[in-house]
Amino acid sequence: MRSEFIESENPVTQENLDWLRKTSGTGPVLILTHDYPDPDALASGMALSALISKAWDITSSLVYSGVVARAENRAMLHLLTPNWEFREQVRDFDAYSAVALVDTQPGAGNNSYPTERSADIVIDHHNPIRDHSHSVPFTDIRPDVGATSTLLFQYFQAADITPDQDLATAMFYGLHTDTLGLARGASNADEIVYFNLLGLLDRKKLVQVEQAGLSRLYFKAFSDGLQAARVYGNVIISDLGSMHRPDLSGEMADVLIRLDSARAALCYGTHRQTLYLSLRTKATVKDAGAIAQALVAGFGKAGGHGSLAGGQVPLGDQDLQSLIKIVEKRMLTLLDEVGPGAPLLGG
């Protein structure tokens, strides 16, 4: 028997559920997410797996590529979403009745799914809606929603199913981190789902995830990022150099945007021959996703929503320093800032 949820207008209909079931086939379904998955990716992929299993007895395989390196994300993977399997590459697509991309899209540049193949299911909340997504049989892409976990919870509601405690905790944490506790890019739907999940989660495990231990390497990288940060009027930029994990740029940007004078924070660094960028903005700056796309136009791919965005540029034979100069110049031009900048920490 399901828990009583807070009532809301749910756009997911029985017709949507029927089409999802038909598109999934008889199983197993291969569920993929973006490389180096974050909490929302891990939770929403796990949620789709649980949904099709509970509703229609369809099996699935959860596969991710890249490293889950951030301490909280590792704790979440092990404690709440252990069904994910790491693979450097996936080749046996024909062994599955359907391929689902969750919290990412074909052609987004942040996943390992080959663009020459058509996916069967895409559920995501990121801008822009990629061209490859238009040919996918089942798509639910809503950039106005703050987290993909919100979309999956609505499917659970429509199917009259309650996520178990571990999954509810994972979905809550995914929604919480993507929206900074509803303070960043959250919609009315996110708010309703947030409070529904709050009544279902395991608080002890949530604390274990949020308070996961940090290594000395983390503190060294964090210190270097602060030392490298420069302030250009209302914009702060930090070159993190060679990063031990690609999501460090996002973690640093989350902190630097809290500078009281900042309207935007851009952090970038390299990992395995790719330049990763993370952008955070405040309410006075519109559409971080569009800004991030402009920063890497002609070089790489980017996307985002509201005040959060990221991008990747494969380096190949490109000169890194020249590329960085172009990105920084574009950033300052777009935000109407000039001048050489000053170190955040002085000196």
Image (cartoon, grey):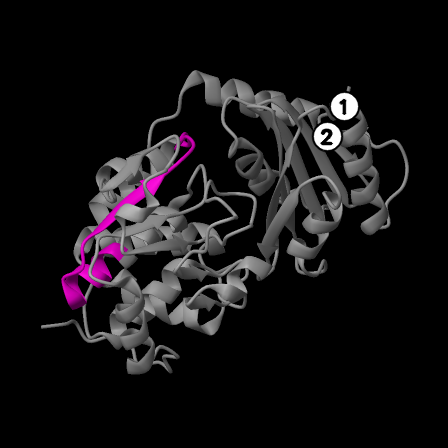
**Magenta residues, as a range?**
49-70
Query: Is 64 in the magenta?
Result: yes
- Residue closest to the eye, 94 or 129: 94
In the drawing, does residue 340 fall left or right of residue 122?
Answer: right
The image shows residue 64, relative to residue 284, as above or below, that is above
Give the amino acid at mark 1: Asp
Instruction: Say which label, 2 or 1, has the lower sequence index.
Output: 1
- Under circle 2, the secondary element is loop
In the drawing, does residue 42 fall left or right of residue 134?
Answer: left
- Residue closest to the eye, 7 or 167: 167
Residue 122 rendering spot, x and y as whole percentages: 42, 60
Residue drawn 82% across and 35% down? 326
Give the amino acid at mark 2: Leu
- Residue closest to the eye, 142 or 172: 142
Point out the image quarter for the N terminus: bottom left
In the drawing, does residue 70 fall left or right of residue 6?
Answer: right
Disc on res. 294: none
Query: Is 58 in the magenta?
Result: yes
Crowding around mark 1 (Cα neighbors within 10 Å: few <14, some 14 to 19, many 20+) is few
Residue drawn 18% across and 69% down? 161
- The residue wearing badge 2 is 344
- The residue wearing badge 1 is 319
Residue drawn 49% across and 54% down? 105
